[in-house]
Image (spheres, rainbow, N blue to C red):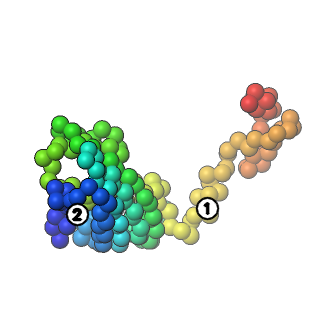
Amino acid sequence: MELEAYRVNIVGLSNKVHYFNFELGAEFFRKYGTELVPTGDFRVDVVLDKHETFIDAEFKIHGKVELTCDRSLEQFDFQIETARKMLFKYGEKDEEITDEIMTISRDTVSLELGQFIYEFIALSVPLKKLHPRFQNDADDEESEGKIVYSSSDEPTQANNGEEIDPRWNILKKLK
């Protein structure tokens, strides 16, 4: 599979909405990088709305990625469903303005969407990769030690059973 498979010719597109679909597999991730996303199976629907001065692109990505659990080192499938937007504005030179806005020159013949798709998938992968059977443990760990607010002046118990300093209740009244 060539990288050309994710390149959309914009010179021949008329000023209206255009639809593109891509199926991604292991070969896609070998081409774009396996550091963040080793492999996966995805369907990507791209809607390009071409105008005279810009192209509005909407990416809808759904599928699964194979991750390695940080705790047990077991492989597991993680479902990803995300929607992202990009705006390609015509300008003097090709440059990234923000994460969602890029300028492209009027001479640009095609848009290479593969890199954007890869980045959107990589951004959807959690930093802490836990097998689903450890998910309840992770939720318990995150809730431990958090301050629990209440509307009364009485000291409140945190999830770990410790009493919260009454000074916090005074500060809560300032809200």
Q: Quadrant of residue 117?
A: bottom left
Q: Is residue 124 left or right of residue 148?
A: left
Q: CA distance from mark 1 to mark 2?
A: 40 Å
* Residue wearing tag 1: 137
* Residue wearing tag 2: 6
Residue 81 at x, y percent in the picture: 45, 64
Give the label, 1 or 2, closer to the camera: 2
> Which mark is on residue 41?
none
Q: Is residue 26 visible?
A: yes
Q: Residue at (74%, 43%) from the top-left corner?
A: 148
* Quadrant position of the N terminus in the picture: bottom left
Is the Cβ of the residue at disc 1 closer than 8 Å to that at disc 2? no
Q: Residue at (65%, 57%) from the top-left corner?
A: 140
Kind of residue indicated by mark 1: Asp
Graded by Cα atoms within 10 Å as few (under 14), some (14 to 19) or many (20 or more), the crowding at tag 2 reads many
Element at label 1: helix
Q: Is residue 35 visible?
A: no
* Quadrant position of the C terminus in the picture: top right
Q: Is residue 107 above or below residue 20?
A: above
Residue 36 at x, y percent in the picture: 34, 57
Which of disc 2 and disc 1 is earlier in sequence?
2
Nearest the viewer among 66 and 158 is: 66
Q: Quadrant of residue 66?
A: bottom left
Q: Quadrant of residue 118?
A: bottom left
Element at label 2: helix
Nearest the viewer among 77 and 164 is: 77
